[in-house]
Image (cartoon, rainbow, N blue to C red):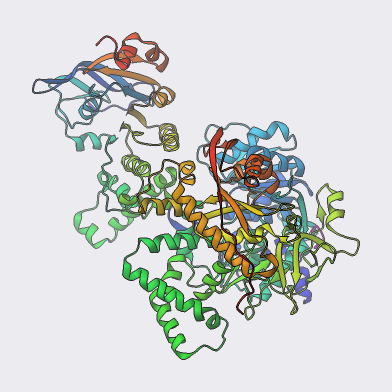
Amino acid sequence: MTNKDLELDTFPKLIRRNANERPKVPAYREKQYGIWQTYNWKDVYDNSRSLGLGLVELGVKRGDAVAIIGSNRPQLYWVFSASQAVGALPVPLYQDGVAEEIQFVLEHAEAKIVIVEDQEQVDKVLSVMDQCPTIEYIIYKEDRGMRHYDQPFVKSYAEVQELGRAYDQKHPDFYEVEAEKAKGSDIATLMYTSGTTGRPKGVMLSFDNMVTAGRLSSEFENLNENDKVLSYLPMAWVGDHLFSYSQAAQAGFSVNCPENAETVLTDLREIGPTYYFAPPAIFENMLTQMMIRIEDASSIKQKMFHYFVDVAKKCGVEILEGKPVSLVDRLLYKLGDFLVFGPLKNTLGFSQIRVAYTAGAPMGPEVFKFYRSLGLNLKQLYGQTESCAYVCIQNDKDVRSDTVGPPAPGCEIKIDEASGEVLFKSPGAFVGYYKNDEATAEARNSEGWVYTGDAGIMTDDGQLKIIDRAKDVGKLTDGTLFAPQYIENKLKFFPFISEAVCHGADKETVTAFINIDMEAVGNWAERRGISYTSYQDLAGRDEVYAQIKDCVEQVNRDLGIDSELAGAQISRFLVLPKALDADDGELTRTRKVRRRIIAERYGQLIDALFSDVSVVNIESDMTFEDGRKGMLKASVKVANSETYPAMRAAS
Amino acid sequence: MTVQDVKPGEVLLQVDDISLSFGAVRAISDVSFNILKGEVRAIIGPNGAGKTSMLNCINGFYHPQQGTITYKGQARSQMKPFEAAAQGIGRTFQNVALFRGMSTLDNIMTGRNLKMKSSLFSSMIWWGGAQKEEMEHRRYVEDIIDFLEIEAIRKTPVGRLPYGLQKRVELGRALAAEPELLLLDEPMAGMNLEEKEDMCRFILDVNDEFGTTICLIEHDMGVVMDISDRVMVLDYGGKIGDGVPEEVRADQNVIDAYLGGGH
C-alpha cells in the first residue's frame, strides 16, 4: 500500500479522487424515458456534495443516521457518499420490507432522516412515524404522486440539493473540511442482516472494513474503470454494497441501475456487463426459463441445443480453464459457440462477462457446471455481512462446484473442531453489532475469530467447503448426517421445484416439503392439456405429484452414491399448496428459508409426513399479493418415494 | 359559438334529449346528462341498455337522430370521430383495438398521430424538424410508459401480452392524444382482481395527475361506486337514475333494473 492509498481511507475521499483523476468516466447510469442516462464521477461528486450539504442544512450532525429505502438508483447511492462526507451514518433498508420490518430498523438505528425512492416508500415511512420519534425529515426522489403531500417534513431530493447548493455558496470550504475529518476506523455504514434467525441485527462496518475489502477484491480480479456492473440486488445487501459502491469507488467502474425490477433481463442485455453477480436463485431461474423456452422452440433448434449442450458438458469447463482438450472436441465446441452458446449468452446479456459471481447460498453443482460449460467464468464467493462479503474467492484456474475457494488475500480461516463451524479473521471483519454487545461477544471470540454460523470442512489443499448452516445440520436417529440444505439444493436443481424444505433431525427418516415452480409446471401442464385454476389446484394435481416423485427419487439415487449422506434419503414428501413467501415471513428477503417459522406454521404437515396418513387438512394464514391477509384452507396429499441402497460411486 | 376554456367543476359536455335508433330498434331515447370538468363520471346499466351507443354518440361514431351534444360550449351536429379526437375526446374500446403486431411503444406513438405536424416528405427522410418532433413525441410517450409502469413491455408486440396489459396499453394510447375528456368502455372487463385494482389506481391517477375528465362504462359495481364522482344509470335506452354513488345505490328503479324486478 502506498502513502497515497493510505490517505484514501474513506469513500468520500475515493470519490473525490475519481472526480479529479477520471471526471468524464461513467460512474452511474440509469434508464430514464427508455434512454440510458450517464452520470460521470464529477457528477457523482457534485451531487453528493450538494446533497450532503443539504442534509447539514436540515440539521444533520455528525453521527446521525440517514436511512435509505428504495431500489437501486444512482441518487440513492449518492446518499452513502453524501452522508459519509458530512459524518452521518447511512443505513440502507430492504425496500420490499413490510412496514413493521422497516419500523424496527428505523427505530433501532434512530434514523433522523429517511431518504426514499417514491410515494410508496413515503407512505410506508409515514405509517410508522409515530413509532419512530427520531425521524425529522422524509426525502423522496421521485416526484410522481407527491403533489398532495404538504407536510413540512416531507421534502424532495432536488429541493434538498438546492438547499445544499445555497449552503455551499455561503460556506465553500465546509464540505471538504468535514470530509477530511473522517478516519478509516470510523463507522462507514450500518447494514442490517436479513434476519434468517430472529430480529435483524445492525452490523457496524468501518471505512477500513469496506474500503479494504473493496480494494483487495478489486485487485484480485483486476477490476478497472472499463468494467461495467448491473446493480439490481437490494442496496441493503452487503454484496451489492461491495460491488456497486465500494469496488466501484475503488476501481472507478460504472454501475448500471435497471429501469425497474421487471426490466432487469432486458437491461442486462443492453448493458452487457463485464462483471456480474447474482444469487444462485437467479441463475437457477434463468436456467428454468431457458429450458421452458427451448421446449417451445422448433424441433431442429431443440436438437441443436441439446446436442451442443452435451458437447459443452463434456469439454466446456476444461476449455474455460485452459486444460488440454482433444482437437475434435475443441472444434465441436467452437461450432457450438457459434451456433448456440454465443447467441444464448448474448440473449442473456452475458457476452462480455469476464467474471461472474454467485454468493449468498450454495448453488446446485449441475447448474454451476452448466453455466461454466457455456464459457461463462462463474465463480463462487463466500462471505457475510459481518465480513463485507469477503472471505473466500475462487481462483480463475481452480474453480470447483463443491467448494467456495481458498481464503481470499488477507483472510484467514479455521474450522472449529468441536462444532465444525467456520471461523474467520479478515480485514473486512465487522466492528460489532449496533447496540448489541451481547451478540457481538457471541459472534467474536477473544482471539478475534468471527463465528460464521456455517458448518464447513477444509479440503486437504486448503479449499473451504460449506455444508450447511451449523445449527441446521443434524443427525437422524441412526446417526446419519442430515444436512437439509444440501438435499434441498439437489431438489431445487429440477426446474419444476422452486423451493424445498427437508425435515429429519432426530427422526428416523428424511421428508420434504416441495414448492412447485408455477411457471415451469404451469407451462408443462398446459402442454399436456391439464387444466388447473390456481397455484393451489395445480400443486395438488396427481400428475404433478408424479413428476415431483420422479425428481425426488432422482435425488435419492444421487444421495445413494454419496456414502456419508446415503442414509438421508427422502422417504415421504408433499407439495405445499402455497408458495413460501417473504411476506408471510417464511423466507428472508434474500429468499432463504426460515425453518423455525415454517416448522411452527406447518407443524401439522410435518407430523403427517412422519406418520402414515395420505391426506392432511391444513389452515394457515397467508398474505395475498395486494397485501390483504387471508386464510389458506387446503387438503394436502402426502406421497411416498422410493429410497435406494447406498453404493459407492463408480469412480 | 366558439370553443371555450372550461374550468374545473363547470360543464364540459352537455347532452340534451338524445335519441338514437337503428331502424325500429331504439337504442337511446331522450337522454340528457352532463359531464363536469375534472370528474369521474360513470355510466352503468344492464346489457343492451345503450351505454356503448352513448359513448359512440359522444365521440361522433354514431349520429343521433335527435338532440344536441354541446362540448366546451360548442353545440355540434354531425361530427366525425377524428374531429372529436382533435377536439380532445379520447377513448378506449370494449374489445381491445390495438395493432397486435406492433410494439407497445409504437402503439402508443400512434396516439400522438394528431399532434404530428411534419410533412410526409420530411418524415420519410427523418431530418430536421421531423426528427426533433419525433423525439418530443417519444419523450411524451415515455412519460406515459413510466406513468403506466409498462417499461418492461416497451418493445414487446402487444399481441403477445396478457389481456390486462393490453388494456393498459390501450389506455396509454388514448392518453397519448392528451385528451381532455377520456371515454373508457369497460376498462376492467375480463380482468382479475389484481389487474382491476391496478386499473382503478391508474384511472384515478390519470384524473388526478393530468386533470383528465373521465367518463367510463363499467359493470363491476364495487369499482364504479368506489371511483366515480357521479353515476348515470341507463336501462332500455332510457335514463333511470343519475347522481352520486350513494343516491344511485339506494334508488329503487336502479335496484329493480339490476335485479330484474319491475320488468
Expressed as whole percent of the image width and height from the top left, the position of residue A209 reads 77, 63
Expressed as whole percent of the image width and height from the top left, the position of residue B70 reads 23, 23
Name of the residue lying farthest toward the right? A446
Note whether A529 is above or below B262 in the view shown.
below
Expressed as whole percent of the image width and height from the top left, the position of residue A33 reads 43, 52
Name of the residue lying farthest toward the left? B23
Return the residue nearer the eye: A175 or B66: B66
Q: Give the quarter of the figure containing the N terminus of chain A.
A: bottom right
Asked whether residue A609 appears in the rendered view, the answer is yes
Note whether A88 is above or below B245 in the view shown.
below
Magenta part of the protein: which range?
A182-186
Say how many tags the image has. Answer: 0
Quarter of the figure with residue A586: top right
Q: Give the quarter of the figure containing the C terminus of chain A.
A: bottom right
**Left-right relation of B218 to A97:** left
Asked whether residue A40 appears in the rendered view, the answer is no
**Left-right relation of A265 to A195:** left
Return the residue nearer the eye: B199 or A13: B199
Q: Is residue A189 magenta?
A: no
**Residue sitting at x 26%, y 20%:** B14
Q: Chief secondary structure of the magenta span?
A: loop
Q: Is residue A184 magenta?
A: yes
Expressed as whole percent of the image width and height from the top left, the position of residue B92 reads 29, 36
Note whether A358 is above or below B5 in the view shown.
below
Name of the residue lying farthest toward the bottom? A327
**Residue sitting at x 32%, y 13%:** B254
Quarter of the figure with residue A463: bottom right
Return the residue nearer the eye: A326 or A356: A326
